């Protein structure tokens, strides 16, 4: 798997930017906030560590089972262990080189299933599109349930983004809006004509393979099970956030709905292409302050949850890398023995 210089440079830039933000944020904390943060670390209740790990493990298993349904829809041979291992190896890769995890995940799945890489990439794109829909629903649900807490925070973020398209007097900069719309439209038109031109060639075949992968959700014979896995998976994400709240004395009193807010805004941190989602604590901490916690406690929670996610992925990812070849070599030998016996 080749890593180009652009990927290395991008990773380095985002890593340094993330570290700079962490240092800056730490410097802005008062002495009381810093003390509160370290108290949150030291007061963590370790009896909660196993339930938190199990909830995270179940979420990864559910994602793998859901992905396996897409494989079946495209008649790609697969089994639960191989699919789960590919998912975890992808997550492990993402910790060190953001966005390369999806490539490694598809590569591993293709190697051990024998399926076409383009179709498998298509299933991942379809999976991400579905997750985006789920995330949109979750965001709306959070804004409704936690309206009194979240709306001021969300409106502040939206206002900051809209400032890029406004003049100092508050009126919209229609020139910028028009240019952005024109660029997006031109991009869509260009992609359409490129597809028409190359659809019978190698590029066209690859794009058609992606299209088949995208259709994997619609071709599912068990759409209800796919929906169940999706809901249960996101439920596990929320459960992890809530369990970490309960494991810290300074946050154990917060309502269960706070888990919704943490997942909603924490997911944005996962989108930023920095190793290990290093921006996670910086985004989650301000959310907790909306519930009355100090900035230090919010930082402590963010770092504990961040560490939990990364440690879980490292443990399961390393296990998958070691066990996957062993598991498949044994299965191959069993198949050879069975075939020779017949």
Image (cartoon, helix red, strand yellow):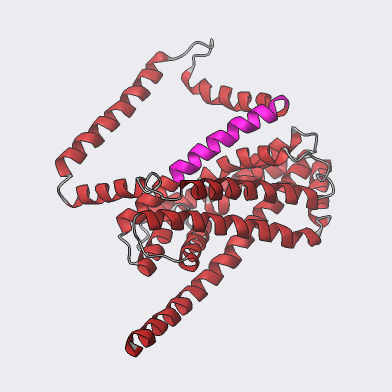
Residue 57 on image: x %, y %? 62, 60
Closest to the observer, 333 or 40: 333
97 drawn magenta: no
Q: Residue furthest bottom?
A: 341
> Residue 140: within the magenta?
yes
Q: Residue reaching furthest front?
A: 342
Range of magenta residues: 128-148
Position of residue 26 relative to residue 187, above or below, is below
Write down the quadrant of residue 28 in the picture. top right
Question: Residue at image x 34%, y 59%?
Answer: 75
**Location of residue 317 in the rendering, given as x and y in whole percent from the top left corner:** 54, 66
Count of labels shown?
0
Q: Is residue 44 left or right of residue 126?
A: right
Q: Nearer the viewer, residue 336 or 13?
A: 336
| Residue 342 x, y percent position in the rendering | 33, 87
- In-image side of 248 versus 10 (left or right): right
Q: Nearer the viewer, residue 73 or 253?
A: 73
Residue 8 visible in this rendered orientation of the protein: no
Q: Specify the quadrant that holds the N terminus.
A: bottom left
Provide the major secondary structure of the magenta segment.
helix
Asked which quadrant contains residue 251, the reply is: top right
Instruction: Determine the residue positioned at 80% across, 42% down.
Output: 33
Quadrant of residue 48 in the image? bottom right
């Amino acid at each position: 798997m080749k890593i180009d210089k652009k990927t290395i440079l991008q990773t380095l830039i985002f890593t340094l930017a993330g570290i700079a933000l962490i240092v800056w944020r730490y410097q802005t904390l008062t002495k009381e906030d810093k003390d509160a943060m370290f108290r949150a670390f030291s007061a963590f209740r370790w009896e909660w560590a196993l339930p938190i790990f199990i909830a995270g493990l179940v979420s990864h298993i559910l994602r793998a089972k859901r992905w396996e349904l897409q494989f079946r829809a495209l008649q790609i041979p697969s089994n639960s262990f191989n699919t789960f291992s590919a998912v975890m190896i992808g997550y492990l890769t993402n910790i060190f080189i953001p966005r390369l995890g999806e490539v490694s995940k598809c590569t591993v799945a293709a190697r051990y299933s024998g399926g076409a890489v383009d179709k498998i990439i298509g299933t991942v794109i379809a999976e991400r599109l579905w997750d985006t829909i789920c995330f949109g629903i979750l965001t709306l649900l959070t804004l409704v349930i936690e309206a009194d807490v979240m709306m001021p925070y969300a409106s502040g973020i939206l206002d900051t983004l809209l400032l890029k398209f406004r003049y100092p007097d508050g009126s919209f900069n229609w020139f910028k809006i028009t240019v952005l719309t024109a660029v997006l439209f031109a991009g869509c038109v260009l992609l359409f004509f490129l597809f028409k031109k190359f659809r019978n060639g190698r590029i066209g075949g690859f794009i058609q393979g992606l299209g088949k992968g995208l259709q994997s959700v619609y071709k599912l014979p068990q759409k209800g099970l796919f929906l169940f896995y999706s809901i249960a998976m996101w439920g596990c994400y929320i459960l992890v956030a809530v369990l970490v709240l309960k494991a810290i004395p300074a946050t154990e009193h917060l309502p269960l709905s706070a888990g919704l807010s943490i997942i909603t805004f924490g997911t944005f941190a996962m989108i930023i292409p920095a190793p290990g989602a290093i921006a996670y604590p910086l985004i989650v901490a301000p959310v907790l302050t909306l519930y009355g916690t100090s900035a230090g406690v919010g930082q402590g929670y963010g770092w504990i949850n961040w560490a939990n996610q990364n440690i879980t992925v490292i443990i399961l990812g390393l296990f998958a890398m070691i066990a996957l070849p062993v598991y498949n070599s044994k299965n191959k030998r069993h198949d050879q023995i069975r075939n020779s016996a017949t």
